[in-house]
Amino acid sequence: MALVTPETKLCDVILDEPSAITVINRFGISLGVGDKNVRTICAQKGIDINFFLTILNAYIYESFFPENGFDSFGAQEIIEYLEKTNQSYLKYQLPNIERHFKALIGHSDKNNNLPLLLNLYKEVKEEIIKRIDNDNKHWFAEILRHEKDVAPGQLTIEASDTQRTADSIEDKLSDLKNMFVIHLRGDYDRNLCQAVLFAIINFEKDIRQNNRIRNHILYPLAVALKKASSTNN
């Protein structure tokens, strides 16, 4: 699929990449989009179209970088989107996986390693909570502080500043998925197991795709803001 443009029908995006539903939900767009294009839907919802396209394309395409996309939005808008994402993790996705996990254990034979896998999941959950706490108390606050010191048009944002380090949360979710597929033993409820595994797989994908927004969009902007703020001070 080509990059999403203002003229792309949003229904085509969703049908080609169903995971995009999480993005449109975070923008307050409900399903039932008809055959309207992105331009029309953004206008109806009062959404900055450049920001929407930047987030959506970064979420879908690993190598995407908005060469001219920072003109109409800044760190504040990106952070607000990521805060909605973090709240979705805390309120819905993490509790949902754990609830299904416990139901699976309750409906399965005692001679399995599901409690061990649940403990691994809880480790990942705690790491995600710590990262969200760091976002709220430190990283986001620092970026917004620098943004206040920088005048529009003062930034030079480089694609080379994208963060490319490995993410331990992604790695641990991948390990947990592999444990289910390769090392699960004993008798268990297959339907509940499938529900848990699918939830983990979808969550891993959402984390990975949102990391692109963190690393390819917000991080290079944060680097540019810090440089410009240091120059001003």
Image: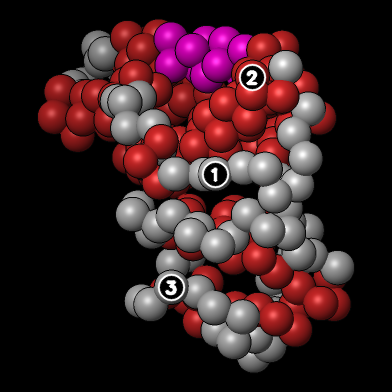
Mark 3 lies on a secondary structure that is loop
Q: In the image, is 116 to the left or to the right of 88?
A: left
> For the residue marked with disc 1, what is the amino acid?
Thr
First of labels 1, 3 by sequence position: 3
Residue drawn at 77 percent across, 40 percent down: 151
**Residue named by callout 1:** 156
**Residue named by callout 3:** 3
Q: Mark 1–mark 3 contact, CB under 8 Å?
A: no
Give the dominant element type of the magenta stretch: helix, strand or loop. Answer: helix
| Residue 230's disc number | 2
Residue 59 placement (x, y as % from top left):
48, 53
Q: Nearer the viewer, mark 3 or mark 2?
A: 2
Disc 1 to disc 3, C-alpha distance: 24 Å
Mark 1 lies on a secondary structure that is loop
The answer to which of 181 and 152 lies nearer the viewer is 152
Residue 156 in view:
yes
Magenta highlight range: 123-136
Residue drawn at 50 percent across, 81 percent down: 12
> For the residue marked with disc 2, what is the amino acid?
Ser
First of labels 3, 2 by sequence position: 3
